[in-house]
Image (cartoon, rainbow, N blue to C red):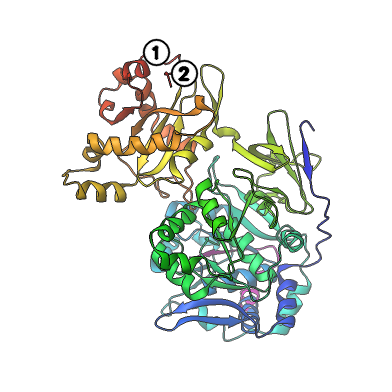
């Protein structure tokens, strides 16, 4: 192995628990302790105890066994976060079957692909539109047991909860081994077609053994949870941290989509820890700066730390939390690593843009190209039905090749870019598309998404996808009229508005050769159903770049695309220099 090594001296130990034995131990210790709470109309949050959870999980597991579901069979769930989803997945994994979570926002095509690939024998689906998607797609024939949240359908979830035996459930749990697969998590597809990642019980629970050595989370802790459970950050990392530590999961019923509802729930729950992506933290800080009452709600004395992942947290956002006495912890990982690999520990000074040290029991190295390799009990078993991809991803020494580029230093690991998100300028300089795109979007008001361009060119440009709600609101207040989005984004004042935000993002950006010098404003919004965004709202870069390749070419050679010229903005005082000889960079 070439490159620097960084590993933890604290062994995580051998995992002897499974999801089922973990559940039984928690029930034995704290049967009446609240494990989950959700808002009831007009009545605030109502909690469910571990004892009640066990009874419901036992009922679902016994029902599935009676319906012919055996160990290692796949069982899917197509639902937003809910108590039913929690019960269903715990029952499936505890009895030795394999849970296949499907993103609640997926359309028929994505659902069909997952059903055809995973062939689940049973499925819980919540919601009329989701049920219609299932009924209309191929792959439905594999689902011999379809459970819904609709009382008018043949098998209604709540009616199943009336039966079952805890003793029969205990017998099922005893037959499960930590090496058995518990989940098939489908990747978000940012680097190609989604893959079914097989994660064992020991993968999931080794992380909790490791976190127990790093974090102190008391049993009376309160997690306000909105991260989608089909995704590894919310479903495996946050959710199982709460379950393992006997914290209470409070469901954030706006699912992170309504900042004012989130703050309202925050006021009621007073979370002791909060897990989120940077975009939500940016919104929370913006609200806190505007309103002292909101600031007091957010920064209450019980809040121990906030945890961020998925993208770099803007420096000023992290500093704002720190100035109010709240630690910001950051982490990095992938679905294939269950997901956490590194995190910043409490008490250690967090350095902006670094994602910390490996969790106990996990080790990382980088090769001469700066690709990060990971080895440890958190690394997946492999890709479902794909031995070739598995062999490519995990070498003979057990190292998982992540496809992420990074640097290791005394401050821990710094993520540079995805391997396929790196491109070269004509000068030979390498550009990290991730760094450019994050600088443009993480604190942006007018820019929703951005894709860095410039492979083989002399300087960097970007495709800009505006936040049309914000831009239209500004334009309306400015007294402007427009017939469609295309007319709106070619308005000179709107272009200058966005240009100012691009300049602001590039102001202190380093290195300077990666700074954006021109951009095209595209009058479209990216979408999940169009295959342009992942369910967690990450841009699927290769698809967007291919789809809008002509816009990228038009930035450098506008004379070849006169119809697109009105959408292109050059930040140089001499646009002809930018749009002429693309073999040399523009002057700063």
Visible residue check, residue 79: no
Would residue 73 be counted in the magenta stretch?
A: yes
Is 568 located above or below residue 185 in the figure? above
Secondary structure under tag 1 reads loop
On-image quarter of the C terminus? top left
User: How many residues crowd around disc 2 within 10 Å: few (fewer than 14), some, or many (20 or more)?
Assistant: many
Q: Which of 460 and 563 is in front in this view?
A: 460
Q: Residue 410 lies in what quarter of the image?
A: top right
Q: Mark 1 points at which residue?
A: 581
Is 461 located above or below residue 138 in the figure? above
Residue 121 lies, in percent from the top left, at 59, 65
Residue 346 lies, in percent from the top left, at 68, 58
Task: Looking at the image, tell me whether mark 2 or mark 1 is earlier in sequence order.
Answer: 2
Visible residue check, residue 260: yes
The boundaries of the magenta stretch are 63-78
Would residue 111 be counted in the magenta stretch?
A: no
Is 243 located above or below residue 238 in the figure? below
Q: Mark 2 points at which residue?
A: 458
Residue visible at 71% across and 62% down in the picture: 215
**Dots 2 and 1: beta carbons under 8 Å?**
yes
Residue visible at 77% across and 35% down in the picture: 4
Count up the numbered dots.
2
User: How many residues crowd around disc 1 within 10 Å: few (fewer than 14), some, or many (20 or more)?
Assistant: some
Residue 56 lies, in percent from the top left, at 60, 81
Residue visible at 54% across and 28% down in the picture: 511
Q: Residue 160 lies in what quarter of the image?
A: bottom right
């Amino acid at each position: 192995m070439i490159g620097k090594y960084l590993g933890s001296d604290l062994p995580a130990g051998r995992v002897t628990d499974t999801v089922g034995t973990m559940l039984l131990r928690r029930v034995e210790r704290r049967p009446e302790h609240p494990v989950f709470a959700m808002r009831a109309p007009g009545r605030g949050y109502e909690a469910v105890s571990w004892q009640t959870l066990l009874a419901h999980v036992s009922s679902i597991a016994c029902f599935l066994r009676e319906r012919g579901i055996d160990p290692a069979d796949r069982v899917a769930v197509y639902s937003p976060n809910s108590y039913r989803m929690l019960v269903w997945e715990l029952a499936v994994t505890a009895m030795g079957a394999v849970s296949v979570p499907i993103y609640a926002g997926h359309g028929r095509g994505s659902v069909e692909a997952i059903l055809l690939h995973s062939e689940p024998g049973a499925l819980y689906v919540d919601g009329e539109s989701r049920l219609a998607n299932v009924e209309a797609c191929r792959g439905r024939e594999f689902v011999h047991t379809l459970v819904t949240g609709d009382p008018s359908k043949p098998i209604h979830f709540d009616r199943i909860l009336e039966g079952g035996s805890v003793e029969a459930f205990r017998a099922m749990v005893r037959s499960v081994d930590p090496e058995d697969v518990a989940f098939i998590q489908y990747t978000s597809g940012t680097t190609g077609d989604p893959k079914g990642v097989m994660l064992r019980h020991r993968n999931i629970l080794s992380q909790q053994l490791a976190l127990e050595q790093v974090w102190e989370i008391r049993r009376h802790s309160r997690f306000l949870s909105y991260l989608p459970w089909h995704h590894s950050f919310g479903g495996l990392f946050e959710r199982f941290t709460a379950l393992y530590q006997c914290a209470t999961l409070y469901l954030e019923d706006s699912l992170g989509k309504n900042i004012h509802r989130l703050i309202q729930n925050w006021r009621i729950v007073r979370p002791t820890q909060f897990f989120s992506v940077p975009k939500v933290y940016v919104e929370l800080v913006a609200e806190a700066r505007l309103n002292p009452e909101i600031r007091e709600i957010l920064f209450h004395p019980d809040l121990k730390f906030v945890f961020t992942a998925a993208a770099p947290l803007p420096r000023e956002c992290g500093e704002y939390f720190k100035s109010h006495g709240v630690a910001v912890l950051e982490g990095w990982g992938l679905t294939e690593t269950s997901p956490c690999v590194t995190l910043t520990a409490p008490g250690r000074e967090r350095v902006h843009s670094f994602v910390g040290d490996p969790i106990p029991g996990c080790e990382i190295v980088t090769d001469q190209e700066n690709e990060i390799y990971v080895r440890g009990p958190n690394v997946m078993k492999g890709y479902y039905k794909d031995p070739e991809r598995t062999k490519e991803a995990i070498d003979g020494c057990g190292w998982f090749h992540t496809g992420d580029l990074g640097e290791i230093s005394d401050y821990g690991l710094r993520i540079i870019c995805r391997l396929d998100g790196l491109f070269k300028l004509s000068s030979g300089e390498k550009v990290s598309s991730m760094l450019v795109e994050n600088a443009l979007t993480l604190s942006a008001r007018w820019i929703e998404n951005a894709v860095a361009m410039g492979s083989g060119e002399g300087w960097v440009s970007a495709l800009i996808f505006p936040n049309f709600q914000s831009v239209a609101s500004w334009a309306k207040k400015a007294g402007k009229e427009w017939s469609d989005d295309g007319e709106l984004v070619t308005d000179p004042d709107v272009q200058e508005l966005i240009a100012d935000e691009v300049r602001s993002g590039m102001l202190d950006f380093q290195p300077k050769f990666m700074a954006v010098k021109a951009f095209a404003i595209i009058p479209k919004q990216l979408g999940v159903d169009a295959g342009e965004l992942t369910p967690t709202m990450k841009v699927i870069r290769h698809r967007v770049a291919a789809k809008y390749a002509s816009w990228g070419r038009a930035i450098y050679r506008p004379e070849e695309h006169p119809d697109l010229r009105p959408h292109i903005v050059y930040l140089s005082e001499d646009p002809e220099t930018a749009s002429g000889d693309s073999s040399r960079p523009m002057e700063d």
